[in-house]
Image: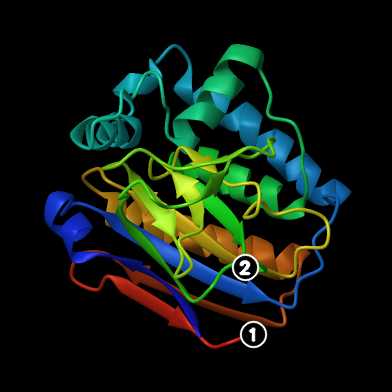
Amino acid sequence: MGGFVYTEEICEKFPGTRGAVIHAAGLANGASPPDLVADFEAEQARVLSQIGDTQLSELPSIAAWRRCFSAFGVKPTQYRNAAESLLRRLTKQGDIPSINTLVDMANLVSIRHRVPVAVFDQAMVTGVTEVRFADGTESFTDLGSDATGAPERGEVVFVDEASLVSARRWCWRQSAQSAARTGTTDVLITIEGQHDGAADDVAAACESMMALLVAHLAPGTRTAGLIGPSAPRFEFGGR
């Protein structure tokens, strides 16, 4: 049995949290097909046109995540949430490169709806993943590095029952173990918002992601749910 849950402390500290979680299995992740690449490039052009000269800090969803990061002691201009990092790359460099099917789908949905979307390979996850404040004893291996360390006490992390961290500073960076890559077959996808209207935006993003999964990866099984302080838990069956 696996799952994803916001702890009581997170719900109390961040009552505006709204999330969607998708579990999909029986996948065959690999290089993105040409039609997905074309759709991703078209979405990037559309988003660039929509944003224009607007500062990213003025986008309601980005501003809300900045406030959230500040509330648990992280400088938001030093550690940017995943959606802001993508939009910053897009507006500064003009494009976001293709990585693989799962990552491209998540990035497309993230820039379209301006919310963080993360894909976590479940191969090394033990039990349920909690979103909670770190106590500093957990284990984290940074994506792109072999070095293992611990998160700072008090930062928000995604952590499993074996104290393995899959994401630090909430939606800042994933672990090396959790990254979707060629050969990934079983994933947990999270979509989150903190802003007014986040419930609608997150639900719409979830629909977009589910449609892309069906179109490009035809998962053997898939389940999805909306979560938040009033319903903080999502569960799925064992692999």
Q: Quadrant of residue 235?
A: bottom left
Residue indicated by mark 2: 122
**Quick check: 231 above or below 181?**
below
Give residue 46's position: percent from left, percent from top: 59, 31
Residue type at tag 2? Gln
Give residue 215's position: percent from left, percent from top: 73, 66
Checking the image for residue 108, the label placed there is none
Q: Quadrant of residue 170?
A: top left
Q: Residue at x 23, y 37 (%)?
A: 72
Residue indicated by mark 1: 239
The colour scheme of the drawn protein is: rainbow
- Sequence-wise, which precedes: disc 2 or disc 1? 2
In this view of the protein, which residue sits in the foreground, 8 or 61? Answer: 8
Q: Residues within 10 Å of mark 2 (few under 14, many from 20)?
A: many
Give residue 152's position: percent from left, percent from top: 35, 38
Q: Residue at x 35, y 46 (%)?
A: 136
Q: Secondary structure at mark 1?
A: loop
Q: Residue furthest front?
A: 137
Give residue 28's position: percent from left, percent from top: 82, 68
Q: Is residue 106 left or right of residue 70?
A: right
Q: Is residue 191 left or right of residue 126?
A: left
Q: CA distance from mark 2 to mark 1?
A: 9 Å
Residue type at tag 1? Arg
Q: Secondary structure at mark 2?
A: loop
Q: Residue at x 72, y 82 (%)?
A: 220
In this view of the protein, which residue sits in the foreground, 217 or 74? Answer: 74
Q: Residues within 10 Å of mark 1 (few under 14, many from 20)?
A: few
Q: Is residue 106 left or right of residue 65?
A: right
**Quick check: 14 above or below 151?**
below
Q: Is residue 118 left or right of residue 60?
A: right
**Quick check: 46 above or below 105?**
above
